[in-house]
Image (spheres, rainbow, N blue to C red):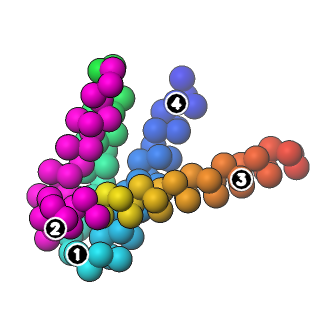
Amino acid sequence: MHEVIIAFFVQLVVSTIALWLAMKLTKEDGPFWGLFIAAFASSLVNVLPIPYVGWMLSLIVLLVLISKFTTAEIWPDAVLIVVVAWALAALANVALTMALREYMTNA
């Protein structure tokens, strides 16, 4: 159970940093804590046991909160931020997985 909580918070930090970097790359402005709140709320909605629509609700929550906490409009700015952030987070997750795998094989 502790591993799940640790993984949730690691993913939350990675998502927040990816959102912040995506916001800077798209030339939008907003506070880091607002992106943290958006990522946290979206992650909580995503873990709700609602089959087939949980990820869509999570995306809607993320888009609405990004548009609330930043200067981005929902279309196209917030959508672009989310797409860029998901790409950055995927790259970060691959890098973390590779680093952890390397650590585990050398330990």
The N terminus, quarter of image: top right
Mark number for residue 98?
A: 3
Q: Residue at the spot x=22%, y=75% of the render?
A: 28
Query: Which residue position is annotated with label 1?
Result: 28
Query: Which residue position is annotated with label 4?
Result: 4
For label 4, count other residues whose C-alpha is less than 10 Å away and answer few (under 14), some (14-19) or many (20+): few
- Mark 3–mark 2 contact, CB under 8 Å? no
| Amino acid type, callout 3 | Met
- Where residue 40 sits: x, y (%)? 31, 44
Q: Residue at the spot x=52%, y=38% of the render?
A: 6
Q: Main secondary structure of the magenta part?
A: helix
Q: Earlier in the sequence, mark 4 or mark 3?
A: 4
Q: Disc 4 on helix, strand or loop? A: helix
The verdict on residue 77 being magenta is: yes
- Where residue 21 sits: x, y (%)? 39, 70
- Cα separation between marks 3 and 1: 31 Å
Q: Disc 3 on helix, strand or loop? A: helix
Residue extending furthest right? 106
- Mark 1–mark 2 contact, CB under 8 Å? yes
Give whichever of 36, 77 is nearer the camera. Answer: 77
| Amino acid type, callout 4 | Val
- Mark 4–mark 3 contact, CB under 8 Å? no
The verdict on residue 50 being magenta is: no
- Cα separation between marks 1 and 2: 6 Å
Left/right of residue 44 with respect to residue 68 in the rendered view: right
- Cα separation between marks 4 and 1: 33 Å
Mark number for residue 72?
A: 2
Give the magenta-colored segment's residue range: 51-80
